[in-house]
Image: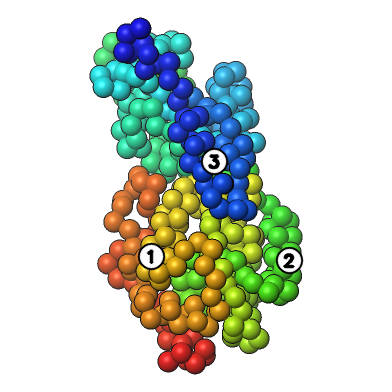
C-alpha cells in the first residue's frame, strides 16, 4: 500500500478525541465518560459549515441536502460533538483529503478554494477536529457574509460562477439568528431548578467543591459589588456563607465546571460537566487558569483547605489577576476570551478591591 493511501485509511477524530476524554474521566471522578463526551466525530467539508448556517436563514432544514440535514440534527442533540474539517488541500495535508464526493456542481477547483478560504479565515488547518459548538460560534463571529467565498462580484469564467444561493441573503439571515438557531440554549426553568437544588446542597454541605480559578472570579464579583442572590453561579452565596457562618468550611479543588458552584450557569454543559463560554471552547482557557492557579498555590485537584486558610493563601500569592487570567491570544483562537484580553496588561481592579475588603472581613490583614 502506498503511503498516501495508507494515511487516508486512518480514522479522523475518534481516537484523538476519545483518548484524552477517557483519561480525564478515569483520573477525575466524578466526571464525564468517553461515551458522554463525544461519540463518533462528524466529518464535514469546511464549506458545509456555511451551508448549515444558510439553511437556518432559509428556514428550510432540508435546503442543505440530506447529509447536512442529518448533521444538523446530530449537532442539535449533541452540541459538542467533535467535527473534523477535511478538504482537498493536497500537499503535506494530503493525508486527510476526502476526495470529491461532496463537491457541489460548481466544480472541483471552486470547492477547493472555498474550503481553503473558510479555513484561512478561521485560522484552522485541514483535518482539524473541534467541538461543533466552538466551530459554529467562531464561524458566526468571523464569517458574517459569504460574499467573496461562495460567490464573486466579478465572474471571470463559468468555472467561477459560484453558488446560486450566494446572493440570496440566506447565510446572512442565519448569522443574524445566531447560535441558538442551531444549538438550543439552557432554558430558564432548567437553570432556576439547578440554582435551587445547588443552593440547598451548599447550605447543607460539610465540604464544598469548586474549580480553582473561579475563586478569583468570586473575589472580582465581591469587589464589583455583586451580592446574593445571583442567577448565574453560586459564588456570591459561597462567600456569604463563609463570611457569616462558616469561615472554616472545607473547600475542595475540583475539575471542570463543578455542579456545586456552576449548576445554574447558562454556559455550562451538564452532560459534560464542562464550560462552553468563550466561543464554545471556554473549557480550554479555564482549564489552564485552574492549573496555573494550582501551581501558584502549590495545590492539586483534590486538595482541600479550610476557607479562611485557602483565601489567605490566595491573597498572599495572587495579588493581581493578570498572571492567572491574562491572555496574549487574539481572535480567532480557542484560547481567547474577553476576560483574558482585559487582563492582558493589568489585573482586574475589582479583584484588587475585593481582595482588600475580604482580607479585612476574614481578619487576614
As drawn, 31 above or below 291: above
Q: Which label lies toward us, 3 or 2?
A: 3
Secondary structure under the numbered disc 3 in the rendered image: helix
Query: Are the residues flagged by discs 1 and 3 in contact, CB closer than 8 Å?
Result: no
Say which mark, if any, is on residue 295: 1
Residue highlighted by disc 3: 22
Q: Which mark is residue 196?
A: 2
Identified at 34% across, 19% down, the residue is 95
Which quadrant would residue 239 be assigned to in this image? bottom right
Q: Please determine whether, in this image, residue 296 is positioned above or below residue 313.
A: above
Label 3 vs label 2: CA separation? 31 Å
Mark 1 nearby-residue class (10 Å; few <14, some 14–19, many ≥20): few
What quarter of the picture does the C terminus occupy? bottom left
The residue at the point 49 percent across, 37 percent down is 19
Relative to the observer, which residue lies in front, 343 or 108? 343
Dot 2 lies on which element?
helix
Asked if one can make out residue 169 in the rendered structure from this viewpoint, the answer is: no
Q: Pick the quarter of the image with the N terminus.
A: top left
Where does residue 296 sit, x and y in percent of width and height? 37, 69
Amino acid at each position: 500500500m502506498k503511503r498516501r493511501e495508507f494515511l487516508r485509511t486512518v480514522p479522523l477524530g475518534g481516537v484523538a478525541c476519545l483518548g484524552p476524554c477517557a483519561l480525564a474521566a478515569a483520573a477525575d471522578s466524578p466526571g464525564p465518560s468517553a461515551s458522554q463526551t463525544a461519540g463518533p466525530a462528524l466529518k464535514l467539508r469546511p464549506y458545509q459549515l456555511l451551508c448549515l448556517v444558510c439553511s437556518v436563514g432559509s428556514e428550510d432544514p432540508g435546503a442543505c441536502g440530506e447529509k447536512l440535514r442529518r448533521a444538523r440534527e446530530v449537532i442539535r442533540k449533541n452540541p459538542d460533538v467533535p467535527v473534523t474539517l477535511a478538504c482537498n488541500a493536497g500537499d503535506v495535508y494530503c493525508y486527510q483529503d476526502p476526495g470529491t464526493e461532496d463537491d457541489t456542481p460548481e466544480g472541483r477547483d471552486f470547492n477547493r478554494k472555498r474550503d481553503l478560504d473558510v479555513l484561512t479565515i478561521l485560522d484552522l488547518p485541514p483535518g482539524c477536529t473541534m467541538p461543533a459548538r466552538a466551530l459554529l460560534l467562531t464561524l458566526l463571529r468571523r464569517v458574517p457574509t459569504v460574499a467573496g467565498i461562495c460567490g464573486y462580484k466579478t465572474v471571470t469564467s463559468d468555472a467561477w460562477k459560484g453558488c446560486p444561493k450566494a446572493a440570496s441573503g440566506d447565510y446572512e439571515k442565519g448569522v443574524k439568528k445566531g447560535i441558538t438557531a442551531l444549538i438550543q440554549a439552557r432554558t430558564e426553568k432548567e437553570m432556576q431548578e439547578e440554582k435551587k437544588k445547588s443552593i440547598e446542597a451548599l447550605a447543607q454541605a460539610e465540604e464544598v467543591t469548586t474549580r480553582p480559578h473561579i475563586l478569583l472570579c468570586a473575589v472580582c464579583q465581591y469587589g464589583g459589588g455583586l451580592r446574593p442572590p445571583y442567577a448565574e453561579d453560586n459564588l456570591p452565596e459561597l462567600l456569604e456563607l463563609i463570611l457569616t457562618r462558616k469561615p472554616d468550611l472545607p473547600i475542595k479543588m475540583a475539575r471542570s465546571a463543578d455542579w456545586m458552584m456552576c449548576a445554574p450557569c447558562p454556559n455550562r454543559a451538564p452532560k459534560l460537566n464542562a464550560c462552553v463560554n468563550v466561543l464554545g471552547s471556554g473549557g480550554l482557557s479555564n482549564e489552564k487558569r485552574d492549573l496555573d492557579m494550582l501551581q501558584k498555590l502549590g495545590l492539586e485537584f483534590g486538595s482541600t483547605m479550610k476557607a479562611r486558610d485557602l483565601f489567605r493563601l490566595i491573597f498572599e500569592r495572587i495579588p493581581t489577576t493578570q498572571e492567572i487570567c491574562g491572555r496574549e491570544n487574539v481572535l480567532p483562537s480557542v484560547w481567547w476570551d474577553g476576560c483574558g484580553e482585559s487582563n492582558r496588561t493589568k489585573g482586574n481592579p475589582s479583584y484588587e478591591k475585593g481582595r482588600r475588603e475580604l482580607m479585612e472581613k476574614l481578619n487576614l490583614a
